[in-house]
Amino acid sequence: MSLEGRGAVITGGGRGIGAAVARSLAERGARVVVAARSAGEIEAVATALRSGGIDAWACRVDVSDPESISDLFSQARGHLGEIDILVNNAGIATAAPVARLELEDWNRLLSVNATGTFLCTQAVLGGMVERGWGRIVNVASVAGLRGASYIAGYSASKHAVLGFTRSVAAEVARDGVTVNAVCPGYVDTPMTDGSIANIVSKTGKSAEEALEAILATTPQRRLITAQEVAAAAVFLCDEEARGINGQTIVLDGGAIGGLR
Ligand code: NAD
């Protein structure tokens, strides 16, 4: 499986799942632009890749800001030429009972997770269609497939990402472009560290007890690794995955499938 010479942009690439996706795409020969808000994190990922002889650049972006997105993609075109692969991974999570979910937090969740995915996709889709090749992978979540207590805003934003994925996939189905999603359960990243810290502060549980409570909801009783999510995302970018379009790959050890 080779992505030799392909130009890829990964949003939220500074840590967690996005950093693992950037490394995995680069290992298969892609040239990568690692984009996120935190300059130090994206520069560290890009520097590590460059030290392994890979063409990699760090570009700052706030995907909740249309101007920042347009700036990212003009920089990315300067580095990569064409953008063949986009991984919409930047995301945030907030947990609160719906009665206490602030409008500002709701708007922010929708803006980063859903509108950011829309705007980044819009920035690259025309070029992919013109050239007859493109891969877009949206990092959604199992929360995009089912609801759960205290994540109404996050879940709504990820349901939006999946509806968007399927609809755009239909639009470009005859153009050599595929649009798919990966839907992880709890992944071992700073975002899950944040969820654990939130449970600790809201319930008085210890961090170990909070982790146990999370693991008790997973059939495999473990967190998914960022690398496992990256492997699925990279598979969807492969030439031989061209028949897979508008789909979601669920990585949750079987919870969505009904396993306990
Ligand atoms: P993380 O918090 O470790 O990393 C998130 C990345 O997104 C960071 O690089 C951050 O800088 C970037 N980011 C956040 N807001 C941004 C913005 N406005 N503009 C640009 N970049 C921004 O999280 P992660 O666990 O690696 O999550 C990555 C994606 O996977 C997210 O979309 C998340 O919703 C999804 N996801 C995570 C889990 C999990 O358990 N960690 C489960 C399912 C889905």
Image (cartoon, helix red, strand yellow):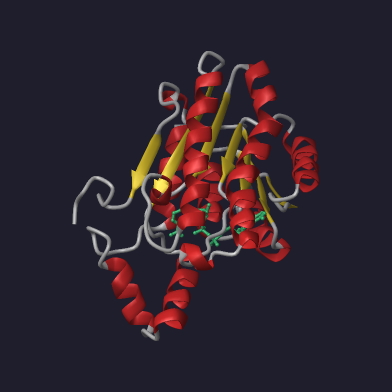
Tell me: 63 left or right of 157. Answer: right
Q: Is residue 172 above or below residue 46?
A: above
Q: Residue furthest front?
A: 99
In front of the other: 2 or 68: 68
Q: Position of residue 91 (x, y in %)?
A: 57, 54
**Rendered-image quadrant of the N terminus:** top left
Q: Position of residue 254 (x, y in %)?
A: 25, 49
In front of the other: 229 or 68: 68
Q: How many marks?
A: 0
In front of the other: 240 or 174: 174
At 73% across and 52% down in the image, what residue appears?
61
At 54% across and 64% down in the image, what residue appears?
101
Q: Residue furthest left?
A: 260
In front of the other: 135 or 239: 135
The answer to which image quadrant residue 118 occupies is top right
At 57% across and 32% down in the image, what residue appears?
4
Q: Position of residue 104 (x, y in %)?
A: 65, 61
On the rendering, which quadrant does ligand 1 occupy?
A: bottom right
At 42% across and 24% down in the image, what residue appears?
240
Q: Is residue 163 visible?
A: yes
Q: Is residue 145 above or below residue 214?
A: above
Q: Is residue 209 above or below residue 3?
A: below
Q: Position of residue 7 (x, y in %)?
A: 64, 35
**Rendered-image quadrant of the C terminus:** bottom left
Q: Is residue 28 visible?
A: no
